[in-house]
């Protein structure tokens, strides 16, 4: 048998020494590997943490960019932004539910919610949160500071059991939505288990709360600008109306002078011609001439009164107010226009109610109103060829201490579609009309504290009703009247 080869020292065979060396190397390698494992594990943990943080940052950046993109638009839906914020906060902060509470009067109401049941939302709608320390959101709104309760049931001041049982949460985070240091809402997150929110997650929620404030502030600013624009438009409209009123007052005065003076001037010319004819008789008819001249004088006085009435109408004083018997006034107008009514083949019929109370007003102006109404009736009946032309004037008392005068004609009537505009300035149904007669009539009646309206007559025609209060009316200026020209 061959002897095992030994080293020079003769102490150990070579093969055995090699086996021992190999074993030692394997063991040493294993120890070295075991010493490297903690370092590798640490690097992997760091990489996982950094990857998670990067993922969170990217999600946060994407959510922020989307919200800011919507907010930056000229118009946006606030509810859409709030819903997006609570949904993003819920996912990024690993919460079970997220809410935004906004003040409404003295309480907080649920403005946006994600993750809660319909039962919770119904309870929230019926039980708004009052600012106070009994609830997390109420405490946050009261103090204007972030409140984090790892377990609401362990907090001695917490009394929001109704919310807690329906929301099934234990951990609760509330962040104030601050504007100029004052809370204008609360951003709240909850978890079903007792699991506190991390500092990074709280920071996320604070960011979302700030974005919600920006959205709400933008809506407020947009609404403020809209309100300012509306007020500016209204002011410009009032200034334009005042300017138009002044121009129309001047035009109305000129037109009214021409309209009112034409009648007495026509009568003067007619009576002058009659007087000349009577003087040309053989022998001259002096009595008829005298009557015609007297009518000329009366009509000249009436023309003078027209100027006085117009000056009083567009003035600012109460001069000319006196007690007026409406029956006497209307009968006087019918007598004044008796010949004109006869020339147009119109039968007039007066139905005055006796013992009417007196009214206070400007007699000349009211006389011009009824003259205008009767002239309009005459023109309305000129087109009637196949029926009786009848003018009726009635007076009667009205409950509420007022007097009514109704002027009814049997003309063709007024188109119902235009009946609400015929009293407006420069609106007319006549081919040659200026649209000022009825507008001036309405202005006179309203300055006497009364009303002027029109309605259809039966079987045809129109009824103009003048309502005048008994006693002294409160005088309004032309520019102060709602319907001023």
Image (spheres, rainbow, N blue to C red):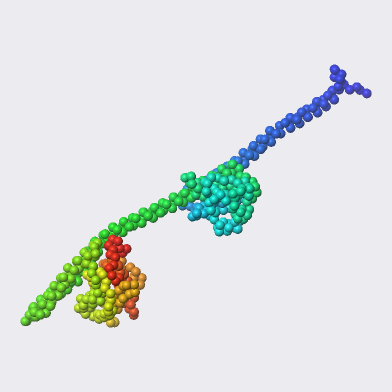
Q: Position of residue 184 (x, y in %)?
A: 50, 49
> Residue 42 vs residue 403: left or right?
right
Residue pushed farthest right?
Answer: 1
The structure residue drawn at horizontal position 39% and vertical position 52%, both measured from the top left corner, is 228
Q: How many marks?
A: 0
**Residue 161 or residue 175, whichever sits in front:** 161
In the rendered image, the quadrant that contains the N terminus is top right
Q: Residue at x 20, y 68 (%)?
A: 306
Q: Is residue 337 left or right of residue 76?
A: left
* Front residue (pair 352, 68): 352
The image quadrant of residue 352 is: bottom left
Q: Residue furthest left?
A: 283
Q: At which x and y percent is residue 343?
A: 21, 79
Q: Is residue 402 left or right of residue 303?
A: right
Residue at screen point 67% across, 35% down: 42
Q: Residue placed farthest to the top in the image?
A: 8
- Asked if residue 284 is positioned above or below residue 480 in the image, the reply reads below
Q: Residue at x 28, y 57 (%)?
A: 243
- Residue 160 versus residue 403 in the image, above or below: above
Judging depth in this view, the residue of 365 and 145 nearest the camera is 145
Residue 277 position in % (x across, y down): 10, 78
The percent position of residue 89, horizontal first and vertical second, equals 57, 48
Q: Is residue 232 visible?
A: yes
């Amino acid at each position: 048998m061959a002897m095992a080869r030994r080293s020079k020292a003769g102490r150990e065979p070579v093969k055995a020494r090699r086996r021992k060396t190999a074993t030692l190397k394997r063991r040493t390698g294993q120890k070295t590997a075991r010493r490297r494992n903690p370092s590798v594990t640490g690097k992997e943990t760091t990489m996982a943490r950094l990857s998670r943080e990067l993922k969170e940052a990217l999600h946060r950046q994407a959510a922020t960019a989307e919200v800011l993109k919507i907010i930056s638009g000229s118009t946006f839906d606030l509810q859409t932004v709030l819903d997006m914020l609570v949904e993003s906060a819920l996912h990024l902060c690993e919460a079970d539910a997220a809410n935004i509470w906004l003040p409404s009067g003295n309480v907080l109401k649920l403005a946006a919610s994600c993750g809660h049941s319909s039962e919770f939302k119904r309870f929230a709608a019926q039980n708004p949160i009052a600012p106070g320390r009994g609830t997390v959101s109420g405490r946050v709104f009261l103090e204007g500071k972030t409140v984090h309760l790892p377990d609401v049931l362990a907090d001695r001041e917490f009394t929001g059991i109704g919310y807690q049982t329906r929301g099934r949460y234990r951990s609760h985070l509330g962040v104030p939505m601050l504007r100029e240091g004052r809370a204008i809402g609360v951003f709240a997150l909850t978890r079903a288990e007792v699991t506190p929110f991390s500092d990074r997650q709280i920071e996320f929620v604070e960011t979302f709360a700030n974005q919600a404030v920006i959205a709400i502030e933008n809506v407020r600013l947009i609404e403020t600008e809209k309100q300012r624009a509306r007020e500016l438009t209204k002011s410009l409209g009032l200034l334009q109306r005042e300017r138009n009123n002044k121009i129309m007052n001047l035009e109305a005065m000129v037109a009214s002078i021409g309209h009112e003076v034409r009648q007495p001037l026509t009568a003067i010319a007619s009576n002058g011609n009659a007087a000349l004819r009577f003087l040309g008789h053989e022998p001259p008819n002096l009595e008829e001439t005298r009557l015609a001249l007297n009518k000329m004088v009366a009509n000249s006085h009436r023309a003078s009164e027209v100027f006085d009435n117009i000056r009083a109408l567009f003035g600012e004083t109460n001069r000319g107010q006196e007690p007026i018997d409406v029956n006497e006034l209307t009968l006087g107008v019918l007598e004044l226009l008796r010949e004109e009514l006869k020339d147009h083949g119109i039968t007039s019929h007066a139905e005055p109610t006796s013992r009417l109370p007196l009214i206070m007003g400007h007699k000349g102006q009211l006389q011009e109103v009824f003259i205008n109404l009767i002239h309009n009736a005459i023109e309305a009946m000129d087109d009637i060829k196949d029926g009786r032309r009848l003018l009726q004037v009635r007076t009667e008392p009205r409950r509420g201490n007022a007097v009514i005068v109704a002027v009814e004609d049997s003309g063709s009537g007024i188109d119902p579609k235009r009946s609400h505009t015929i009293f407006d300035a420069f609106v007319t149904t006549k081919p040659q009309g200026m649209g000022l007669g009825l507008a001036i009539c309405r202005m006179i009646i309203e300055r006497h504290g009364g009303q002027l309206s029109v309605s259809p007559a039966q079987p045809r025609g129109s009824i103009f009703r003048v309502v005048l209060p008994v006693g002294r009316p409160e005088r309004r200026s032309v520019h102060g009247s709602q319907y001023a020209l």
